[in-house]
Image (spheres, rainbow, N blue to C red):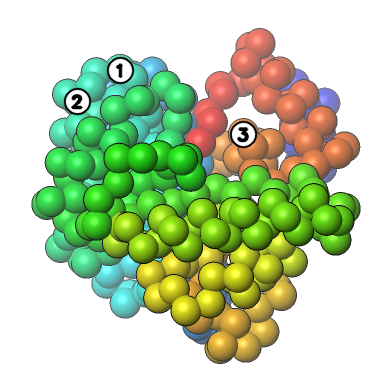
Amino acid sequence: MADDNIIKRLAFRLVKRHIAGFTIESALNSVRILNAKKLHATVTFLNGHVHDRVKAKYNTNAYMQLLRQLSRLHLDAGISLRLSQLGYDVDKGFGERNLAEIIDAAREGAKFVWLEGEQSVPDVPKLYKRLVQKHALLGMEMPLGYKEVRKEYNIKIRYHMHNMRADAKSADAKGLVQEFSRNISSLAERVGSVTVFEKDYHVLSKVINSCQGKRNLIFELPLGYEKNINTDKQARGMSVYVPYGRDWVPYIISSIAEGRVKRVATTLLDGEKNGGGSSNAN
């Protein structure tokens, strides 16, 4: 256990610029810094794998507190959550009631809420269809090829081109970026807004240039990758995904880490799953 804790601390030192911190206060401070650079923020709480109502309620209250603080401090930020965090896997009705409380808090503060996609919860589109009528500042993360879209929908696409960074200048990579840009432009004409999430600013900037003139497009980078944005013009239409919380390992594996850091993080997560601690994936 002591060795695992040492490894985890060392791994965190390598990725800590991508995590706002462990508390709501640390997340709020990151949002303040981003807002000062004219950047919008989307905040998420890294505390998942809920197996009981107590933890689900804790997560629900944490998101409601976060929304109230963002509103009270007049910060330009919304939140992003997974239904499994709210107890949807424990009891669907219970999870939906928790989500309804969060939506009410978001509506009071006029804050945006993203529903993230996850394999264990296939009901996101059905819930979204109902809830977006109640709170227009609501979005859902979906695959690019999702067909059942409406004009009032707000869609987020996670653009997984970052594994091609070393080959970003190749003809194939260029063609993929162009094809993706065409699909995004087409989708933007059919829905309320489209957010494109990608950690490689070099690749993302190519998509931005290809999609010029689309007013309902937002481009989002994970925290720690916004250093390439240096002017107000570049910051326009940009958002930064701000995760906070102690259960950072699964997020780093899925969204940030590569090579040795990813292997170390995966080993840490496997150790937690096998009894070395509680596994809480976001």
Q: Secondary structure at mark 1?
A: loop
Q: Amino acid at mark 3?
A: Pro
- The foreground one among 282 and 72 is 282
Q: Secondary structure at mark 2?
A: helix
What's the mark number on residue 250? 3
Return the residue at label 2: 94
Return the residue at label 1: 90
Label 1 vs 3, first from the N-terminus: 1
- The foreground one among 146 and 52 is 146
Q: Residue at x 53, y 65 (%)?
A: 219
Q: Which quarter of the rendering shows the N terminus?
A: top right
Q: Quadrant of residue 220?
A: bottom right
Q: Amino acid at mark 1?
A: Val
Residues at circles 1 and 3 in contact by the CB criterion of under 8 Å = no
Q: Residue at x 54, y 59 (%)?
A: 182
Instruction: Report the side of 90 relative to 273 (left or right).
Output: left
Q: Amino acid at mark 2?
A: Phe
Mark pair 1, 3: CA separation: 20 Å
Q: Is residue 217 visible?
A: yes
Residue 138 position, x and y percent, is: 27, 54
Residues at circles 2 and 1 in contact by the CB criterion of under 8 Å = yes
Instruction: Report the side of 93 relative to 238 (left or right).
Output: left
Q: Is residue 201 visible?
A: no
Q: Is residue 93 above or below residue 105?
A: above
Label 2 vs 3, first from the N-terminus: 2
